[in-house]
């Protein structure tokens, strides 16, 4: 595990987000150590997309399902959904995903988290949210055919 950036406000937020994700059962990894099958739910930090690195990409059973963007405590989260949506739409074609763009969007300071489910008929940010457990998400996406990613 790479050292944290606890000396910056966003680094402290990432440290808190890391702890919340681990507590919820996600396996955290850095891009140079990726094993998408290390657990049912794997989070890759600083995940490369066509528009730049997303702070976190969420994978269930080896397939991408969401993005998490970290912001420092006190940051207004409501305007960040567009940035995260850009990441969700900009995955490389070799990355497996049951749905494109990725439907689950999180923006978090580690203290406050907003969530948007783009599978909803009228998606909107909802907050505060907590880190989703990787187990229920894994059950849902395990039953989703891989062919759905071709759309």
Image (cartoon, grey):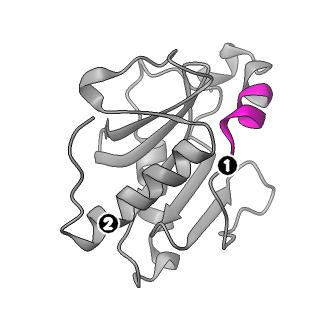
Rendered image: mark on residue 132 = 1
**Residue 64 found in image quarter:** top right
Task: Where is residue 14? Give x, y as percent.
Answer: 36, 58
Name the residue that disc number 2 marks: 12
Horizontal relation, residue 133 to residue 88: left or right? right
Task: Where is residue 5? Give x, y as percent.
Answer: 21, 58
Relative to 29, is 90 above or below?
A: below
Residue at 60% of width from left, 20% of height from top? 150
Are there few (<14), some (14-19), or many (20+) residues within 10 Å of tag 1?
Answer: some
Dominant secondary-structure state across the stretch colored magenta? helix
Residue segment shown in magenta: 133-139
Q: Looking at the figure, which quarter contains the C terminus?
A: top right
Horizontal relation, residue 14 to residue 145: left or right? left
Between marks 2 and 1, how big is the CA–CA gap?
20 Å
Q: Looking at the figure, which quarter contains the N terminus?
A: top left
Out of 95 and 7, give the one closest to the viewer: 7
Circle 2 sits in a helix, a strand or a loop, which is it? helix
Relative to 22, is 95 above or below?
A: above
Horizontal relation, residue 61 to residue 2: left or right? right
């Amino acid at each position: 595990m790479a050292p944290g950036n606890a000396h910056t406000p966003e680094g402290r937020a990432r440290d808190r987000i890391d702890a919340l994700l681990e507590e919820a059962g996600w396996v955290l990894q850095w891009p140079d150590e990726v094993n998408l099958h290390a657990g049912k739910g794997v989070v890759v930090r600083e995940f490369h997309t066509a528009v730049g690195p997303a702070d976190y990409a969420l994978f269930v059973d080896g397939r991408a399902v969401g993005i998490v963007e970290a912001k420092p405590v006190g940051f207004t989260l409501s305007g960040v959904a567009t940035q995260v949506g850009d990441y969700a739409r900009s995955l490389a074609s070799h990355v497996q995903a049951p749905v494109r763009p990725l439907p689950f969007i999180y923006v978090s300071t580690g203290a406050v988290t907003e969530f948007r489910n783009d599978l909803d008929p009228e998606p909107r940010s909802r907050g505060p949210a907590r880190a989703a457990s990787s187990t229920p998400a894994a059950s849902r996406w395990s039953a989703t055919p891989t062919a759905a990613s071709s759309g």
